[in-house]
Image (cartoon, rainbow, N blue to C red):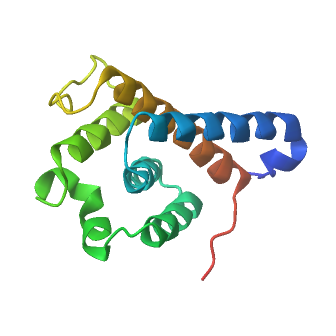
Amino acid sequence: MRHVNLSKQHPAAYAAVIDLNKQAEEAFLAAGLDPKLAELVKIRVSQLNGCAFCLRMHTRDAIAKGETADRLAVLAAWWESQYFTDQEQSALGLAEEVTRLSVPERTDWDNGSLTEHQISAVSWLAIVMNAWNRIAIRSHYPVAP
């Protein structure tokens, strides 16, 4: 299968995703959510989608924002650990639901720790991260040591 760099073939569409990403991140912070949680959501969505490029980028970003190696190590099984707050667990579960598009809709993530504003912000961030994963995977962005 031939891969093409989507950003180079259609730069206007790519620029629109950049703008959407900026708005989603601003909404996330305006909702009073921790910037480290934004990176955890991005990493978890990227884990589910198998996007090595985004995993490497957002793991580095999370570490730069003060995230710990222990929490990053157990993120793929966050529900099995005691490392994450109720709000973080709710956001991660919601991000998984957005990524997997469960039918019928899952609500086990809804432990009451996120406001409607925060639910919307986490959802938008997960939607944008899913778009980025697809751009990176489809463009076959290189991920080398």
Residue 64 vs residue 109, the one in the foreground: 64
**Residue lying furthest top in this view?**
104
Figure quadrant of residue 12? top right
Can you give x and y, in whole percent of width and height, for residue 143 in the image?
63, 71
The x and y percentages for residue 144 are 63, 78
Counting from the top left corner in percent of width and height, residue 54 is at 56, 58
Residue ranking furthest to the bottom = 145
Give the residue displayed 60% in from the left and 83% down from the top: 145
Residue 13: which quarter of the image? top right
Regarding residue 22, the answer to whether it shows in the image is yes
Residue 39, image x and y in percent? 44, 55
Q: Nearer the viewer, residue 90 or 97?
A: 90
Please state which of residues 111 and 133 is positioned toward the viewer in this rendering: 111
Number of labels in the image equals: 0
Which residue sits at x=31%, y=33%?
94
Considering only vertical position in the picture, is 5 above or below 18?
below
User: 105 left or right of 46?
Assistant: left
Residue drawn at the location 41% of the way across and 35% of the way down: 122
Compared with 11, 3 (above or below) is below
From the viewer's perspective, is residue 77 above or below residue 130?
A: below
Report if residue 101 is visible in the image: no
Residue 48 placement, left or right of 10: left
Q: In the picture provided, is 108 more to the left or to the right than 93?
A: left
Residue at point 22% right, 56% down? 77
- Would you place residue 24 above or below residue 92 in this image? above
- Left or right position of 32 against 90: right
